[in-house]
Amino acid sequence: MAGMDPVTIIIWVVSFVVVTVAVTGLSGRVGWSAPVALVVVGAAVSFIPGVPQLAVQPDLILYGILPPLLYAAAIRTSFTDVRARRDGILLLSVGLVAFTVVAVGLTAWIAVPMITLSAAFAFGAVVAPTDAVAVTAIAGRVNLPRRLVTVLEGESLLNDATALVALNAAIAAIISTASGGPGTVTPGDVILEFAIAVIVGVGMGLVVGFVVGFIRRRLHSAVLDASLSLVVPYVAFIPAQELHGSGVLAVVVAGLYLGFRSPVIQTAQARIAEALNWRTIQYLLENAVFLFIGLSVASILGSAVEIGIGFWDVVLISVVLLFAVFASRFVWMMLTTSIYRFGPARLRERGWSYRTGVAVSFAGIRGVVTLAAVFLLPDQTPGRALLQLLALVVVVGTLVQGAFLPLVIRRLRLPAPDYSQETTEKHMLLAEAQTAGLRQLEEQLDDSVDQRVVDRLRANAQFLSDALDNPAPEEAEPLPRSYNRLRRDMIAAEREAILQARKEGRYQERAVRAALARIDVEETELDVGRPRPTE
Protein backbone atom coordinates (compact mmCIF):
# COMPACT_ATOMS: atom_id res chain seq x y z
CA MET A 1 0.00 0.00 0.00
CA ALA A 2 3.01 2.27 -0.35
CA GLY A 3 2.26 5.59 -2.02
CA MET A 4 -1.43 5.64 -1.06
CA ASP A 5 -2.92 8.66 0.65
CA PRO A 6 -4.08 8.17 4.29
CA VAL A 7 -7.80 8.18 3.43
CA THR A 8 -7.37 5.41 0.86
CA ILE A 9 -5.35 3.34 3.33
CA ILE A 10 -8.06 3.74 5.97
CA ILE A 11 -10.72 2.68 3.46
CA TRP A 12 -8.76 -0.47 2.61
CA VAL A 13 -8.17 -1.28 6.28
CA VAL A 14 -11.87 -0.87 7.09
CA SER A 15 -12.76 -3.02 4.08
CA PHE A 16 -10.27 -5.64 5.27
CA VAL A 17 -11.94 -5.81 8.71
CA VAL A 18 -15.46 -5.89 7.26
CA VAL A 19 -14.60 -8.73 4.88
CA THR A 20 -12.92 -10.65 7.70
CA VAL A 21 -15.94 -10.38 10.00
CA ALA A 22 -18.44 -11.09 7.21
CA VAL A 23 -16.67 -14.21 5.90
CA THR A 24 -16.05 -15.54 9.42
CA GLY A 25 -19.68 -15.01 10.42
CA LEU A 26 -21.03 -16.61 7.24
CA SER A 27 -18.68 -19.58 7.59
CA GLY A 28 -19.87 -20.20 11.13
CA ARG A 29 -23.51 -20.16 10.04
CA VAL A 30 -23.09 -22.63 7.18
CA GLY A 31 -20.60 -24.90 8.95
CA TRP A 32 -17.52 -24.12 6.84
CA SER A 33 -13.98 -23.82 8.14
CA ALA A 34 -13.49 -20.06 8.61
CA PRO A 35 -9.68 -20.15 8.12
CA VAL A 36 -9.98 -22.03 4.82
CA ALA A 37 -12.81 -19.77 3.63
CA LEU A 38 -10.80 -16.64 4.45
CA VAL A 39 -7.74 -17.93 2.59
CA VAL A 40 -9.86 -18.78 -0.46
CA VAL A 41 -11.62 -15.40 -0.46
CA GLY A 42 -8.32 -13.57 0.03
CA ALA A 43 -6.66 -15.51 -2.78
CA ALA A 44 -9.54 -14.74 -5.15
CA VAL A 45 -9.53 -11.05 -4.26
CA SER A 46 -5.74 -10.79 -4.67
CA PHE A 47 -6.09 -11.34 -8.43
CA ILE A 48 -8.72 -8.59 -8.90
CA PRO A 49 -7.25 -5.56 -10.73
CA GLY A 50 -6.92 -2.54 -8.45
CA VAL A 51 -6.57 -4.53 -5.25
CA PRO A 52 -3.23 -3.64 -3.60
CA GLN A 53 -0.61 -6.38 -3.80
CA LEU A 54 0.31 -7.40 -0.26
CA ALA A 55 3.95 -8.30 0.13
CA VAL A 56 4.70 -10.21 3.33
CA GLN A 57 6.72 -8.09 5.76
CA PRO A 58 8.21 -10.63 8.18
CA ASP A 59 9.24 -8.10 10.83
CA LEU A 60 5.72 -6.62 10.84
CA ILE A 61 4.25 -10.06 11.43
CA LEU A 62 6.82 -11.25 13.97
CA TYR A 63 7.00 -7.98 15.92
CA GLY A 64 3.55 -6.52 15.29
CA ILE A 65 1.02 -9.33 15.00
CA LEU A 66 2.56 -12.39 16.66
CA PRO A 67 3.07 -10.95 20.21
CA PRO A 68 -0.57 -9.94 20.84
CA LEU A 69 -1.82 -13.22 19.37
CA LEU A 70 0.47 -15.26 21.62
CA TYR A 71 -0.43 -13.17 24.66
CA ALA A 72 -4.18 -13.45 24.01
CA ALA A 73 -3.84 -17.23 23.86
CA ALA A 74 -1.47 -17.45 26.85
CA ILE A 75 -3.61 -15.52 29.35
CA ARG A 76 -6.53 -17.86 28.56
CA THR A 77 -4.41 -21.00 28.83
CA SER A 78 -4.34 -22.80 32.16
CA PHE A 79 -0.85 -22.72 33.69
CA THR A 80 -1.86 -25.63 35.93
CA ASP A 81 -2.85 -27.77 32.93
CA VAL A 82 0.31 -26.85 31.01
CA ARG A 83 2.45 -27.81 33.99
CA ALA A 84 0.59 -31.12 34.36
CA ARG A 85 1.11 -31.95 30.66
CA ARG A 86 4.60 -30.49 30.35
CA ASP A 87 6.23 -33.73 29.20
CA GLY A 88 3.85 -34.19 26.27
CA ILE A 89 4.09 -30.50 25.37
CA LEU A 90 7.90 -30.60 25.38
CA LEU A 91 7.91 -33.74 23.23
CA LEU A 92 5.93 -31.84 20.60
CA SER A 93 7.34 -28.32 20.94
CA VAL A 94 11.00 -29.44 20.99
CA GLY A 95 11.26 -33.09 19.91
CA LEU A 96 8.74 -32.97 17.07
CA VAL A 97 10.13 -29.67 15.74
CA ALA A 98 13.67 -31.09 15.60
CA PHE A 99 12.41 -34.29 13.97
CA THR A 100 10.42 -32.30 11.38
CA VAL A 101 13.38 -30.03 10.57
CA VAL A 102 15.53 -33.07 9.77
CA ALA A 103 12.85 -35.16 8.00
CA VAL A 104 11.39 -32.36 5.87
CA GLY A 105 14.82 -30.80 5.32
CA LEU A 106 16.30 -34.01 3.91
CA THR A 107 13.20 -34.54 1.76
CA ALA A 108 13.45 -30.99 0.39
CA TRP A 109 17.17 -31.44 -0.33
CA ILE A 110 16.38 -34.55 -2.40
CA ALA A 111 13.20 -33.23 -4.07
CA VAL A 112 14.27 -29.68 -4.95
CA PRO A 113 17.30 -29.76 -7.27
CA MET A 114 18.42 -26.15 -6.89
CA ILE A 115 18.78 -25.82 -3.11
CA THR A 116 21.64 -26.60 -0.76
CA LEU A 117 21.42 -28.73 2.39
CA SER A 118 21.45 -25.64 4.63
CA ALA A 119 18.60 -24.08 2.60
CA ALA A 120 16.69 -27.35 2.85
CA PHE A 121 17.06 -27.41 6.64
CA ALA A 122 15.98 -23.76 6.72
CA PHE A 123 12.80 -24.77 4.89
CA GLY A 124 12.30 -27.60 7.38
CA ALA A 125 12.56 -25.09 10.23
CA VAL A 126 10.09 -22.78 8.47
CA VAL A 127 7.36 -25.42 8.21
CA ALA A 128 8.10 -27.22 11.50
CA PRO A 129 6.05 -25.15 14.01
CA THR A 130 2.30 -25.31 14.20
CA ASP A 131 0.57 -21.99 14.49
CA ALA A 132 -1.18 -20.96 17.72
CA VAL A 133 -3.69 -18.90 15.75
CA ALA A 134 -4.56 -21.69 13.33
CA VAL A 135 -4.72 -24.41 15.98
CA THR A 136 -6.99 -22.30 18.22
CA ALA A 137 -9.28 -21.42 15.31
CA ILE A 138 -9.61 -25.02 14.13
CA ALA A 139 -9.75 -26.67 17.57
CA GLY A 140 -12.41 -24.20 18.70
CA ARG A 141 -14.87 -25.73 16.22
CA VAL A 142 -14.88 -29.18 17.80
CA ASN A 143 -15.33 -30.55 21.31
CA LEU A 144 -11.84 -31.94 21.78
CA PRO A 145 -10.91 -33.66 25.04
CA ARG A 146 -9.49 -31.15 27.52
CA ARG A 147 -6.16 -32.97 27.71
CA LEU A 148 -5.77 -32.88 23.93
CA VAL A 149 -6.58 -29.16 23.80
CA THR A 150 -4.00 -28.43 26.51
CA VAL A 151 -1.28 -30.33 24.63
CA LEU A 152 -2.09 -28.66 21.30
CA GLU A 153 -2.25 -25.17 22.79
CA GLY A 154 0.98 -25.70 24.73
CA GLU A 155 2.72 -27.05 21.64
CA SER A 156 1.63 -24.18 19.41
CA LEU A 157 2.60 -21.58 22.02
CA LEU A 158 6.11 -22.93 22.58
CA ASN A 159 7.30 -24.57 19.37
CA ASP A 160 7.98 -21.27 17.57
CA ALA A 161 10.99 -20.75 19.82
CA THR A 162 12.58 -24.08 18.82
CA ALA A 163 11.85 -23.54 15.13
CA LEU A 164 13.26 -20.00 15.06
CA VAL A 165 16.49 -21.15 16.71
CA ALA A 166 16.83 -23.87 14.06
CA LEU A 167 16.02 -21.33 11.34
CA ASN A 168 18.66 -18.90 12.61
CA ALA A 169 21.27 -21.67 12.57
CA ALA A 170 20.34 -22.62 8.99
CA ILE A 171 20.43 -18.97 7.88
CA ALA A 172 23.92 -18.62 9.38
CA ALA A 173 25.01 -21.64 7.33
CA ILE A 174 23.45 -20.17 4.17
CA ILE A 175 25.27 -16.86 4.65
CA SER A 176 28.52 -18.67 5.42
CA THR A 177 28.23 -20.67 2.19
CA ALA A 178 27.42 -17.56 0.13
CA SER A 179 30.48 -15.77 1.49
CA GLY A 180 32.80 -18.66 0.70
CA GLY A 181 32.83 -20.20 4.20
CA PRO A 182 32.34 -23.84 5.15
CA GLY A 183 28.56 -23.43 5.37
CA THR A 184 28.18 -25.62 8.43
CA VAL A 185 26.90 -25.00 11.94
CA THR A 186 27.87 -27.44 14.67
CA PRO A 187 25.27 -29.06 16.97
CA GLY A 188 27.06 -27.35 19.85
CA ASP A 189 26.33 -23.95 18.30
CA VAL A 190 22.64 -24.82 17.94
CA ILE A 191 22.38 -26.13 21.51
CA LEU A 192 24.09 -23.02 22.88
CA GLU A 193 21.82 -20.69 20.91
CA PHE A 194 18.77 -22.67 22.04
CA ALA A 195 19.87 -22.48 25.69
CA ILE A 196 20.41 -18.70 25.45
CA ALA A 197 17.03 -18.25 23.75
CA VAL A 198 15.23 -20.24 26.47
CA ILE A 199 17.03 -18.67 29.45
CA VAL A 200 16.67 -15.09 28.21
CA GLY A 201 13.10 -15.61 27.00
CA VAL A 202 11.84 -17.23 30.19
CA GLY A 203 13.74 -14.74 32.35
CA MET A 204 12.37 -11.73 30.47
CA GLY A 205 8.84 -13.15 30.63
CA LEU A 206 9.05 -13.63 34.40
CA VAL A 207 10.50 -10.13 34.92
CA VAL A 208 7.77 -8.50 32.83
CA GLY A 209 5.08 -10.60 34.52
CA PHE A 210 6.33 -9.69 38.00
CA VAL A 211 6.67 -5.96 37.24
CA VAL A 212 3.25 -5.74 35.58
CA GLY A 213 1.72 -7.69 38.47
CA PHE A 214 3.34 -5.28 40.95
CA ILE A 215 1.85 -2.30 39.07
CA ARG A 216 -1.56 -3.93 38.75
CA ARG A 217 -1.87 -4.39 42.49
CA ARG A 218 -1.77 -0.60 42.78
CA LEU A 219 -4.13 0.22 39.92
CA HIS A 220 -7.77 0.76 40.85
CA SER A 221 -8.98 1.72 37.38
CA ALA A 222 -10.13 -1.02 35.02
CA VAL A 223 -9.45 1.28 32.05
CA LEU A 224 -5.83 1.86 33.12
CA ASP A 225 -5.35 -1.85 33.81
CA ALA A 226 -6.76 -2.88 30.42
CA SER A 227 -4.66 -0.21 28.69
CA LEU A 228 -1.53 -1.51 30.40
CA SER A 229 -2.26 -5.05 29.22
CA LEU A 230 -2.18 -3.88 25.59
CA VAL A 231 1.56 -3.15 25.76
CA VAL A 232 2.59 -6.21 27.81
CA PRO A 233 3.24 -8.49 24.81
CA TYR A 234 5.51 -5.92 23.16
CA VAL A 235 7.34 -5.07 26.39
CA ALA A 236 8.12 -8.78 26.76
CA PHE A 237 8.83 -9.63 23.11
CA ILE A 238 11.06 -6.79 21.88
CA PRO A 239 13.65 -6.71 24.71
CA ALA A 240 13.93 -10.51 24.66
CA GLN A 241 14.63 -10.45 20.92
CA GLU A 242 17.16 -7.64 21.29
CA LEU A 243 19.00 -9.68 23.95
CA HIS A 244 19.17 -12.67 21.54
CA GLY A 245 16.54 -14.54 23.52
CA SER A 246 13.18 -15.93 22.46
CA GLY A 247 10.55 -13.22 22.29
CA VAL A 248 7.96 -15.95 21.81
CA LEU A 249 8.85 -17.58 25.14
CA ALA A 250 8.93 -14.19 26.87
CA VAL A 251 5.37 -13.37 25.76
CA VAL A 252 4.04 -16.84 26.60
CA VAL A 253 5.63 -16.92 30.06
CA ALA A 254 4.41 -13.40 30.87
CA GLY A 255 0.90 -14.29 29.68
CA LEU A 256 0.77 -17.57 31.63
CA TYR A 257 2.07 -15.85 34.79
CA LEU A 258 -0.33 -12.89 34.61
CA GLY A 259 -3.28 -15.11 33.70
CA PHE A 260 -2.55 -17.39 36.66
CA ARG A 261 -2.08 -14.48 39.09
CA SER A 262 -4.98 -12.34 37.82
CA PRO A 263 -7.41 -13.25 40.66
CA VAL A 264 -5.05 -11.73 43.25
CA ILE A 265 -3.52 -8.81 41.34
CA GLN A 266 -6.55 -7.44 39.45
CA THR A 267 -9.96 -6.15 40.40
CA ALA A 268 -13.03 -7.96 39.11
CA GLN A 269 -13.80 -5.07 36.76
CA ALA A 270 -10.27 -5.15 35.38
CA ARG A 271 -10.45 -8.89 34.73
CA ILE A 272 -13.74 -8.57 32.87
CA ALA A 273 -12.46 -5.62 30.82
CA GLU A 274 -9.19 -7.37 29.95
CA ALA A 275 -10.95 -10.60 28.99
CA LEU A 276 -13.35 -8.78 26.65
CA ASN A 277 -10.57 -6.67 25.12
CA TRP A 278 -8.30 -9.61 24.35
CA ARG A 279 -11.14 -11.81 23.19
CA THR A 280 -12.02 -9.14 20.61
CA ILE A 281 -8.39 -8.55 19.61
CA GLN A 282 -7.78 -12.28 19.25
CA TYR A 283 -10.93 -12.77 17.21
CA LEU A 284 -10.07 -9.97 14.77
CA LEU A 285 -6.37 -10.74 14.42
CA GLU A 286 -6.58 -14.51 14.17
CA ASN A 287 -9.17 -14.31 11.40
CA ALA A 288 -7.54 -11.35 9.66
CA VAL A 289 -4.32 -13.37 9.50
CA PHE A 290 -5.96 -15.98 7.27
CA LEU A 291 -7.37 -13.32 4.96
CA PHE A 292 -3.90 -11.79 4.81
CA ILE A 293 -2.43 -15.18 3.81
CA GLY A 294 -4.92 -15.37 0.97
CA LEU A 295 -4.24 -11.82 -0.17
CA SER A 296 -0.51 -12.59 -0.39
CA VAL A 297 -1.08 -15.42 -2.90
CA ALA A 298 -0.87 -13.23 -6.02
CA SER A 299 2.38 -11.61 -4.84
CA ILE A 300 4.03 -14.96 -4.01
CA LEU A 301 2.93 -16.55 -7.29
CA GLY A 302 4.20 -13.51 -9.17
CA SER A 303 7.66 -13.96 -7.66
CA ALA A 304 7.62 -17.69 -8.31
CA VAL A 305 6.84 -17.36 -12.04
CA GLU A 306 10.50 -16.72 -12.81
CA ILE A 307 11.70 -19.85 -11.03
CA GLY A 308 12.35 -21.69 -14.27
CA ILE A 309 10.78 -24.99 -13.14
CA GLY A 310 7.85 -26.48 -15.01
CA PHE A 311 4.36 -26.36 -13.57
CA TRP A 312 4.04 -30.12 -13.08
CA ASP A 313 7.47 -30.29 -11.48
CA VAL A 314 6.32 -27.71 -8.93
CA VAL A 315 3.13 -29.71 -8.33
CA LEU A 316 5.12 -32.89 -7.79
CA ILE A 317 7.55 -31.19 -5.40
CA SER A 318 4.62 -29.67 -3.50
CA VAL A 319 2.93 -33.05 -3.08
CA VAL A 320 6.17 -34.68 -1.91
CA LEU A 321 6.87 -31.99 0.68
CA LEU A 322 3.29 -31.89 1.91
CA PHE A 323 3.46 -35.65 2.39
CA ALA A 324 6.76 -35.23 4.28
CA VAL A 325 5.18 -32.65 6.59
CA PHE A 326 2.15 -34.87 7.28
CA ALA A 327 4.16 -38.07 7.60
CA SER A 328 6.82 -36.66 9.94
CA ARG A 329 4.17 -35.56 12.44
CA PHE A 330 2.26 -38.84 12.16
CA VAL A 331 5.42 -40.96 12.59
CA TRP A 332 6.55 -38.92 15.59
CA MET A 333 3.15 -39.23 17.26
CA MET A 334 3.06 -42.99 16.75
CA LEU A 335 6.62 -43.34 18.12
CA THR A 336 5.94 -41.24 21.22
CA THR A 337 2.58 -42.94 21.79
CA SER A 338 4.32 -46.33 21.72
CA ILE A 339 6.96 -45.11 24.17
CA TYR A 340 4.26 -43.93 26.54
CA ARG A 341 2.21 -47.09 26.25
CA PHE A 342 5.04 -49.63 26.48
CA GLY A 343 7.70 -47.70 28.39
CA PRO A 344 8.32 -47.44 32.14
CA ALA A 345 5.37 -47.41 34.52
CA ARG A 346 5.67 -43.65 35.12
CA LEU A 347 5.27 -43.01 31.40
CA ARG A 348 2.42 -45.49 31.00
CA GLU A 349 0.47 -43.61 33.67
CA ARG A 350 0.77 -40.38 31.66
CA GLY A 351 0.34 -41.88 28.21
CA TRP A 352 -2.37 -41.42 25.63
CA SER A 353 -4.09 -43.77 23.23
CA TYR A 354 -3.22 -44.28 19.56
CA ARG A 355 -6.53 -42.63 18.69
CA THR A 356 -5.41 -39.51 20.54
CA GLY A 357 -2.07 -39.69 18.71
CA VAL A 358 -3.87 -39.75 15.35
CA ALA A 359 -5.99 -36.75 16.35
CA VAL A 360 -2.90 -34.78 17.40
CA SER A 361 -1.19 -35.63 14.11
CA PHE A 362 -4.17 -34.20 12.19
CA ALA A 363 -3.96 -30.95 14.19
CA GLY A 364 -0.54 -29.97 12.80
CA ILE A 365 -1.78 -26.77 11.21
CA ARG A 366 0.62 -24.10 9.95
CA GLY A 367 -0.19 -20.43 9.65
CA VAL A 368 1.19 -16.95 9.38
CA VAL A 369 4.36 -17.73 11.37
CA THR A 370 5.47 -20.14 8.63
CA LEU A 371 4.71 -17.54 5.97
CA ALA A 372 6.65 -14.85 7.84
CA ALA A 373 9.58 -17.15 8.61
CA VAL A 374 10.16 -18.10 4.97
CA PHE A 375 10.54 -14.41 4.09
CA LEU A 376 13.33 -14.17 6.68
CA LEU A 377 15.51 -16.27 4.38
CA PRO A 378 18.33 -14.08 3.00
CA ASP A 379 18.41 -13.08 -0.67
CA GLN A 380 21.35 -15.40 -1.33
CA THR A 381 19.25 -18.46 -0.39
CA PRO A 382 19.17 -20.84 -3.40
CA GLY A 383 15.63 -21.17 -4.75
CA ARG A 384 14.24 -18.57 -2.31
CA ALA A 385 11.17 -17.75 -4.45
CA LEU A 386 10.36 -21.45 -4.85
CA LEU A 387 10.68 -22.02 -1.09
CA GLN A 388 8.27 -19.14 -0.47
CA LEU A 389 5.74 -20.74 -2.80
CA LEU A 390 6.22 -24.16 -1.15
CA ALA A 391 5.73 -22.62 2.31
CA LEU A 392 2.43 -21.17 1.12
CA VAL A 393 1.44 -24.60 -0.21
CA VAL A 394 2.21 -26.15 3.19
CA VAL A 395 0.14 -23.51 5.00
CA VAL A 396 -2.88 -24.00 2.73
CA GLY A 397 -2.48 -27.79 2.70
CA THR A 398 -2.39 -28.09 6.48
CA LEU A 399 -5.36 -25.72 6.81
CA VAL A 400 -7.36 -27.99 4.50
CA GLN A 401 -6.21 -31.00 6.53
CA GLY A 402 -7.28 -29.24 9.74
CA ALA A 403 -10.73 -28.63 8.26
CA PHE A 404 -11.23 -32.41 8.39
CA LEU A 405 -10.34 -32.55 12.10
CA PRO A 406 -14.00 -32.52 13.25
CA LEU A 407 -14.70 -35.53 11.02
CA VAL A 408 -11.58 -37.31 12.30
CA ILE A 409 -12.59 -36.66 15.92
CA ARG A 410 -16.03 -38.12 15.27
CA ARG A 411 -14.63 -41.19 13.52
CA LEU A 412 -12.10 -41.78 16.30
CA ARG A 413 -14.90 -41.41 18.86
CA LEU A 414 -12.76 -39.48 21.28
CA PRO A 415 -14.61 -38.51 24.44
CA ALA A 416 -15.97 -34.97 24.45
CA PRO A 417 -15.42 -32.75 27.51
CA ASP A 418 -17.77 -33.70 30.35
CA TYR A 419 -19.56 -30.39 30.72
CA SER A 420 -21.94 -31.85 33.30
CA GLN A 421 -19.04 -32.93 35.51
CA GLU A 422 -17.36 -29.56 35.07
CA THR A 423 -20.56 -27.77 36.05
CA THR A 424 -20.97 -29.97 39.14
CA GLU A 425 -17.38 -29.28 40.18
CA LYS A 426 -17.92 -25.56 39.67
CA HIS A 427 -20.97 -25.60 41.93
CA MET A 428 -19.16 -27.65 44.57
CA LEU A 429 -16.29 -25.19 44.56
CA LEU A 430 -18.68 -22.25 44.81
CA ALA A 431 -20.44 -23.97 47.72
CA GLU A 432 -17.11 -24.24 49.56
CA ALA A 433 -16.39 -20.59 48.81
CA GLN A 434 -19.80 -19.52 50.04
CA THR A 435 -19.32 -21.48 53.26
CA ALA A 436 -16.23 -19.37 53.86
CA GLY A 437 -18.28 -16.28 53.05
CA LEU A 438 -20.96 -17.25 55.57
CA ARG A 439 -18.29 -17.79 58.21
CA GLN A 440 -16.95 -14.29 57.51
CA LEU A 441 -20.48 -12.88 57.73
CA GLU A 442 -21.06 -14.41 61.14
CA GLU A 443 -17.81 -12.92 62.42
CA GLN A 444 -18.83 -9.41 61.33
CA LEU A 445 -22.39 -9.38 62.67
CA ASP A 446 -23.30 -6.80 65.30
CA ASP A 447 -26.38 -4.85 66.33
CA SER A 448 -25.75 -2.14 63.73
CA VAL A 449 -26.60 -4.49 60.84
CA ASP A 450 -30.25 -4.73 59.84
CA GLN A 451 -31.57 -8.29 60.04
CA ARG A 452 -33.09 -8.03 56.57
CA VAL A 453 -29.63 -7.48 55.10
CA VAL A 454 -28.32 -10.50 56.98
CA ASP A 455 -31.23 -12.68 55.82
CA ARG A 456 -30.68 -11.71 52.18
CA LEU A 457 -26.93 -12.45 52.36
CA ARG A 458 -27.52 -15.79 54.08
CA ALA A 459 -30.20 -16.85 51.59
CA ASN A 460 -27.99 -16.14 48.58
CA ALA A 461 -24.94 -17.83 50.08
CA GLN A 462 -26.73 -20.94 51.33
CA PHE A 463 -28.56 -21.78 48.10
CA LEU A 464 -25.82 -23.81 46.41
CA SER A 465 -24.88 -25.61 49.61
CA ASP A 466 -28.52 -26.60 50.18
CA ALA A 467 -28.83 -27.71 46.55
CA LEU A 468 -25.85 -30.05 46.92
CA ASP A 469 -26.87 -31.39 50.35
CA ASN A 470 -30.52 -31.89 49.31
CA PRO A 471 -30.48 -32.53 45.54
CA ALA A 472 -33.59 -32.58 43.41
CA PRO A 473 -35.18 -35.96 42.53
CA GLU A 474 -33.34 -37.91 39.87
CA GLU A 475 -35.89 -37.16 37.18
CA ALA A 476 -36.00 -33.45 37.97
CA GLU A 477 -33.70 -30.73 36.68
CA PRO A 478 -30.71 -30.11 39.02
CA LEU A 479 -31.39 -27.14 41.30
CA PRO A 480 -28.39 -24.99 40.25
CA ARG A 481 -29.19 -25.52 36.58
CA SER A 482 -32.84 -24.72 37.19
CA TYR A 483 -31.85 -21.58 39.10
CA ASN A 484 -29.52 -20.46 36.29
CA ARG A 485 -32.14 -21.06 33.60
CA LEU A 486 -34.90 -19.23 35.42
CA ARG A 487 -32.58 -16.42 36.51
CA ARG A 488 -31.49 -15.87 32.90
CA ASP A 489 -35.15 -15.53 31.89
CA MET A 490 -35.67 -13.05 34.73
CA ILE A 491 -32.63 -11.05 33.65
CA ALA A 492 -33.94 -10.88 30.09
CA ALA A 493 -37.24 -9.48 31.43
CA GLU A 494 -35.37 -7.06 33.71
CA ARG A 495 -33.28 -5.80 30.79
CA GLU A 496 -36.41 -5.32 28.69
CA ALA A 497 -38.03 -3.33 31.51
CA ILE A 498 -34.96 -1.10 31.85
CA LEU A 499 -34.86 -0.46 28.11
CA GLN A 500 -38.58 0.34 28.15
CA ALA A 501 -38.00 2.83 30.98
CA ARG A 502 -35.19 4.40 28.94
CA LYS A 503 -37.48 4.63 25.93
CA GLU A 504 -40.09 6.42 28.05
CA GLY A 505 -37.47 8.80 29.42
CA ARG A 506 -38.31 8.15 33.08
CA TYR A 507 -34.70 7.84 34.30
CA GLN A 508 -31.39 9.54 33.65
CA GLU A 509 -29.04 7.75 31.25
CA ARG A 510 -26.40 7.23 33.95
CA ALA A 511 -28.92 5.29 36.03
CA VAL A 512 -29.96 3.24 33.02
CA ARG A 513 -26.37 2.35 32.16
CA ALA A 514 -25.58 1.45 35.77
CA ALA A 515 -28.61 -0.83 36.01
CA LEU A 516 -27.75 -2.54 32.71
CA ALA A 517 -24.14 -3.03 33.83
CA ARG A 518 -25.29 -4.60 37.09
CA ILE A 519 -27.41 -7.26 35.44
CA ASP A 520 -24.76 -7.79 32.73
CA VAL A 521 -22.28 -8.75 35.46
CA GLU A 522 -24.73 -11.23 36.97
CA GLU A 523 -25.53 -12.71 33.55
CA THR A 524 -21.80 -13.09 32.91
CA GLU A 525 -21.45 -14.95 36.21
CA LEU A 526 -24.25 -17.32 35.22
CA ASP A 527 -22.49 -18.04 31.91
CA VAL A 528 -19.09 -18.86 33.45
CA GLY A 529 -18.07 -22.38 32.40
CA ARG A 530 -21.00 -22.66 30.00
CA PRO A 531 -20.03 -24.02 26.56
CA ARG A 532 -20.12 -21.26 23.94
CA PRO A 533 -20.74 -21.52 20.22
CA THR A 534 -17.77 -20.61 18.05
CA GLU A 535 -17.85 -16.98 16.94
Image: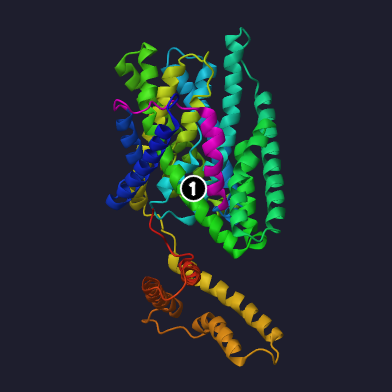
Q: Give the residue number, with chain letter if any, for mark 1.
A: 281
Taking depth in this image into account, of 347 and 26 the one nearest to the observer is 26
Disc 1: CA contacts within 10 A as few (<14), some (14-19) or many (>=20): some
Dominant SS in magenta: helix
Q: Is residue 480 left or right of residue 200?
A: left
Secondary element type, mark 1: helix
- Vertical arrangement, residue 225 with respect to residue 7, above or below: below
Which picture quadrant has residue 454? Answer: bottom right
- On the image, the x and y values in percent for residue 473 come to 40, 84
Query: What type is the residue that disc 1 sits on?
Result: Ile
- On the image, the x and y values in percent for residue 171 come to 58, 20
Magenta residues, as a range?
47-75
Taking depth in this image into account, of 94 and 489 the one nearest to the observer is 489
- On the image, the x and y values in percent for residue 14 come to 39, 40
- Vertical arrangement, residue 176 with respect to residue 193, above or below: above
For the question of whether residue 367 can be seen, the reply is: yes
For the question of whether residue 354 can be seen, the reply is: no
